[in-house]
Amino acid sequence: MREEKLSDAEIKDLLDSGLWELGAHTLTHANLLNTPEVDKRREIAESRRVLADQFATDIPSFAYPFGLYGPDDVVLAQQAGYAFAVTTNEGIDSYPYSAPLELKRIKVSGTEGLASFRLRLRTGRRK
């Protein structure tokens, strides 16, 4: 079963609320570890430009597809103008961020109870 996606109008409404930010994720959900550099550069930079043009908003953040990336991808994200990028590395980064283009994440699945959710927000980990 295919997951429902937000329409452009729904995304615009979220952005107009001032409570949401739009981030990029490459043009084709490319595995950056297996993508030639010229294609990576296009995937990373163009995804930001396309979204900025389509929704008339700044795109300050990027998520590495599948959480797969290397040091050169961090440089490409910086060159593309992203202020932040998220990985799939579990945890919570301390502010000020020492590596804003390699931020950790907290996975929220919706299957955990409230106590587990609170623990995850406090520690960044399941246990």
Image (cartoon, rainbow, N blue to C red):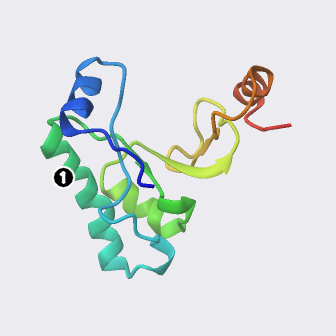
> What residue is rendered at 78% in x and 26% in y?
119
Residue 12 in the figure: left or right of residue 21:
left
> What residue is rendered at 66% in x and 32% in y?
94
Which residue is the extreme one toward the front?
Answer: 1
Residue under label 1, please give it: 50
Horizontal and vertical percent position of residue 76: 38, 63
Residue 47 in the figure: left or right of residue 98:
left
Q: Nearer the viewer, residue 6 or 93?
A: 6
Residue 122 appears in which quarter of the rendering? top right
Q: Is residue 28 above or below residue 90?
A: below
Residue 96 in the figure: left or right of residue 123:
left
Q: Is residue 7 above or below residue 79?
A: above
> What residue is rendered at 61% in x and 52% in y?
88
- Mark 1: amino acid: Val
Horizontal and vertical percent position of residue 59: 29, 41
What is the quadrant of the C terminus in the image?
A: top right
Residue 84 appears in which quarter of the rendering? top left
Q: Is residue 25 above or below residue 39?
A: above
What is the quadrant of the N terminus in the image?
A: bottom left
> What residue is rendered at 53% in x and 61% in y?
66
Horizontal and vertical percent position of residue 125: 77, 38
Horizontal and vertical percent position of residue 99: 57, 46
Residue 49 in the figure: left or right of residue 82:
left
Residue 115 visible, this angle: yes
Numbered disc 1: secondary structure:
helix
Q: Nearer the viewer, residue 108 or 63?
A: 108
Residue 35 appears in which quarter of the rendering? bottom left
Residue 108 visible, this angle: no
Q: Is residue 71 above or below residue 34?
A: above
Please give the count of numbered marks on the rendered protein.
1
Q: Please rate how many residues cluster around mark 1, counting C-alpha atoms within 10 Å: few if below 14, some from 14 to 19, many from 20.
A: some
